[in-house]
Amino acid sequence: MKVPIAKALFNSHSYPQYRKLVSDLLVEGKSTGNEQSENLTLYSTLNETRMNRLEKTMKIPNENSLKLKSLKGEYIWLVISEGWCGDAAQILPIIHKMAEESGKIELKIVLRDENEDLMNLFLTKKAKAIPIVVIIEKATGDLLGSWGPRPKDAADLITNYKKEFGTIDETAKTDLQLWYLHNKGLSTQQELINLMENL
């Protein structure tokens, strides 16, 4: 097992611990991460609402449930996240439900800014984009693969917007959140299940 992965696992949070950490910081008017700003705290507050809603409404279709339950072996999904990240807020509740549904996946979450060595192993076009799901074989600690920071169609939406308008502004972020709302977590489920089945 790579040292940054081992270190990150040692300092990781369960899903409920992560939720509590983000909530407790918000009570103090703070967000997770090295940088503190009004905007980041605002995003974190919005994300709390999103995650609460998703936890209530998100469904795993039967066929996906069966695939998750029939995975061979046991795994750790180590997710790199931050409370202010809009993509993470849309994806974490889905990953949490998938792990629970499977019974073969243990979900661990670490903060990006506290795990720079780990983040540097999983850059997206040289950027520290999150969330990233790091897939580890539980028995051996072997790194099997990774996924993220967002489903392909969502990534394409942002890439195309940037090509057309030259920047990612609030409109792009709103479009992305609407995409997540309509997709209901199905692309994330599909892509992660495909990845797990092809390991």
Image (cartoon, rainbow, N blue to C red):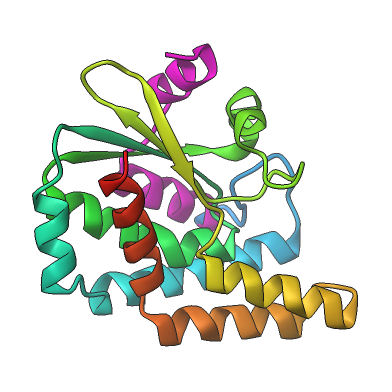
The span picked out in magenta is: 1-26
In the image, taking residue 26 as reference, residue 62 lies left or right, namely left
Q: In which quadrant of the rendered view does residue 136 lie?
A: top left
Q: Is residue 133 visible?
A: no
* In magenta segment, residue 3: yes
Q: Position of residue 23 (x, y in %)?
A: 44, 55
In the image, taking residue 2 as reference, residue 126 lies left or right, namely right
Residue occupying the point 43% across, 62% down:
91
Q: Is residue 60 above or below residue 98?
A: below
Q: Is residue 177 above or below residue 105?
A: below
Front residue of 156 and 15: 156
Q: Position of residue 52 (x, y in %)?
A: 35, 71
Our reading of the magenta stretch's main secondary structure is: helix
In the image, taking residue 139 as reference, residue 9 lies left or right, namely right
Residue occupying the point 86% across, 73% down:
167
* In magenta segment, residue 48: no
| Residue sitting farthest toward the front | 198
Q: Is residue 132 above or below residue 134?
A: below
Q: Position of residue 14 (x, y in %)?
A: 31, 40
Q: Position of residue 141 (x, y in %)?
A: 32, 18
In the image, taking residue 130 as reference, residue 171 lies left or right, namely right
Q: For the N terminus, which image quadrant?
A: top left
How many marks on residues? 0
Front residue of 70 and 30: 70
Residue occupying the point 32% across, 63% down:
189
Residue occupying the point 44% across, 74% down:
49
Q: For the C terminus, which image quadrant?
A: top left
